[in-house]
């Protein structure tokens, strides 16, 4: 049973279960869902679509990785959203940096308590 507990602990959605509490899968899914403002997610998605896209046939693997990132983002993958936030933050646009901070806040403050996002927030605030 500990193996299942550890595997559940490491999943992308960070499902924290308690063996003594019976929770239906539907209730569990609601408890660990990070909600984003649709406009904020749209900004992230637009940026993800523009991230280092190339049509050069030499970069076929890069296009596959890019499509994988877009698919993961559409599926709600926290790490994909974190990666997009990092890319936004590295741009020299104030609006993009604000968007990245908002994304990191949503991830760090959400039910998954995404630690890398919390750390990125700390570094981002230190740079201001």
Image: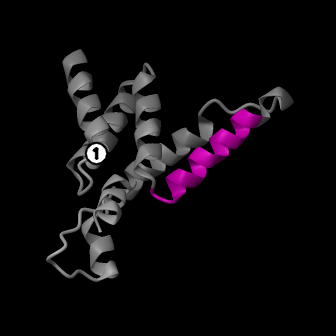
Instruction: Check residue 107 for magenta coloring.
Output: no
* Number of marks drawn: 1
Please tell me whether residue 9 is drawn above or below residue 51 in the rendered image.
Answer: below
Please tell me whether residue 127 is drawn above or below residue 30 in the rendered image.
Answer: above
Quarter of the image that includes the C terminus: top left
> Which residue occupies the foreground of this view, 45 or 26?
26
Residue 32 position within the rendered picture, expressed as x and y whole percent measured from the top left? 28, 64
In this rendering, does residue 85 appear at all?
yes
Q: Quadrant of residue 81?
A: top left
The residue shown at (61%, 36%) is: 50
Q: Secondary structure at mark 1?
A: loop
The residue shown at (58%, 48%) is: 70
Please tell me whether residue 73 is drawn above or below residue 92 in the rendered image.
Answer: below
Residue 66 position within the rendered picture, expressed as x and y whole percent measured from the top left? 64, 40
The residue shown at (14%, 76%) is: 20
Dot 1 crowding, Cα within 10 Å, few <14, some 14–19, many 20+: many
Please tell me whether residue 35 is drawn above or below residue 46 in the rendered image.
Answer: below
Quarter of the image that includes the N terminus: bottom left
Residue range in magenta is: 61-76
Write down the residue under mark 1.
Answer: 114
In this rendering, does residue 34 appear at all?
no
Magenta segment main secondary structure: helix
Instruction: Check residue 66 for magenta coloring.
Output: yes
Residue 38 position within the rendered picture, expressed as x and y whole percent measured from the top left? 39, 58
Left or right: where does residue 19 sit relative to residue 79? left
């Amino acid at each position: 049973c500990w193996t299942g507990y550890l595997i559940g602990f490491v999943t992308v959605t960070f499902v924290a279960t308690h063996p003594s509490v019976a929770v239906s899968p539907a209730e569990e899914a609601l408890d660990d869902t990070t909600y984003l403002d649709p406009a904020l997610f749209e900004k992230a998605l637009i940026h993800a679509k523009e991230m280092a896209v190339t049509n050069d046939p030499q970069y076929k693997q890069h296009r596959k990785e890019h499509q994988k990132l877009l698919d993961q983002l559409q599926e709600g993958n926290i790490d994909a959203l974190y990666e997009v936030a990092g890319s936004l933050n590295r741009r020299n646009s104030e609006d993009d940096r604000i968007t990245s901070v908002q994304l990191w806040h949503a991830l760090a403050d959400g039910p998954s308590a995404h630690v890398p996002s919390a750390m990125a927030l700390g570094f981002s605030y230190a740079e201001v």
